[in-house]
Image: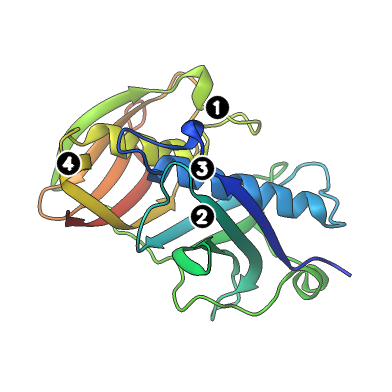
Amino acid sequence: MENKIFEHQYEISLFFVNAQKNVGLYQLLNILQDISFRHGASTTYKQPSGIYWVLTRQTLETTRWPKLGDTITIKTWLSLNERGFLLREYYVYIKDEIVCRCSTSVAKLDANIKKIVPVGKDEIQKYTTTKKLDFSPQKIRRFEDNKPLKTFAVRNSDIDFNHHVNNTVYAKWVLDAVSYEKHFKYQMRSYSVNFLAESHLGDEIEIQQNTTESIYQGLRLRDKKIVFTAQIDAIPK
């Protein structure tokens, strides 16, 4: 019997907090990535050679950020959206309060042919459960009316075991591209991202902001390709 809903606790230590002594977006996304890996390792699923699971879109909503010394409980599971696409969903608890919800669309990539392949019906039946969140990640538009903020060169530490930039690094780049003061003046309520292309060692990514909205995109300078788009909703503190 597969463990369709996986649960794990994390103590919020110094490793997980930012300058405001709470878990920031980049840290929380890494925690969610960790529990996803733990859940997968707890199942009987055996990944065939050349097959990889990739994130395509992600939306995270939060009412408050866990702080230093908190213990959070995270529950995660796989489900399907209304169009039949695979989702990984999350609840983040402080005691009995859900303080964060996250939904990530997941696709199966055949690295041999560089294409997305369908998820088998037997895999869906065996590993998914009922969708619980009332939202799914949506498409974020690209834009031309942009303001360049900062350019980042891909470093060794940005690369994960799939040999490309880890998805959480895009959030870090956006956070690093905005002014330091904004991190103290505003509280983020939601973050959404679309992953459009891989980035590799040696790439330079220019973070751009839409001139009228809190929408961002990463432009790969060597070929002028947009590798991700992201949107942030924040309120004054």
Q: Earlier in the sequence, mark 3 or mark 4?
A: 3
Q: Is residue 121 above or below residue 139?
A: below
Q: Position of residue 16 (x, y in %)?
A: 48, 37
Q: Earlier in the sequence, mark 4 or mark 2?
A: 2
Whole-angstrom CA distance, mark 3 to mark 2, is 28 Å
Q: Earlier in the sequence, mark 3 or mark 1?
A: 3
Q: Are marks 3 and 2 in contact (CB under 8 Å)?
A: no
Q: Name the residue beneath numbered marker 4.
A: 182
Describe the element under mark 2 as helix, strand or loop: strand
Q: Residue at x 53, y 42 (%)?
A: 30
Whole-angstrom CA distance, mark 2 to mark 1, is 18 Å
Query: Which of label 3 and label 4 is nearer to you?
Result: 3
Q: Position of residue 177 (x, y in %)?
A: 24, 33
Q: Name the residue beneath numbered marker 1.
A: 159
Q: Position of residue 194 (x, y in %)?
A: 41, 53
> Position of 41 compared to 138: left or right?
right
Describe the element under mark 3 as helix, strand or loop: loop
Tell me, for residue 56, which label it has, or none: 2
Say which amino acid is labelled 1: Ile
Query: Which of label 4 and label 2 is nearer to you?
Result: 4
Tell me, for residue 190, which label it has, or none: none
Q: Which colour style is shown?
A: rainbow
Q: Earlier in the sequence, mark 3 or mark 2?
A: 3
Whole-angstrom CA distance, mark 4 to mark 1, is 28 Å
Q: Name the residue beneath numbered marker 3.
A: 12
Q: Is residue 131 above or below residue 227?
A: below
Q: Is residue 89 visible?
A: yes
Say which amino acid is labelled 4: Lys
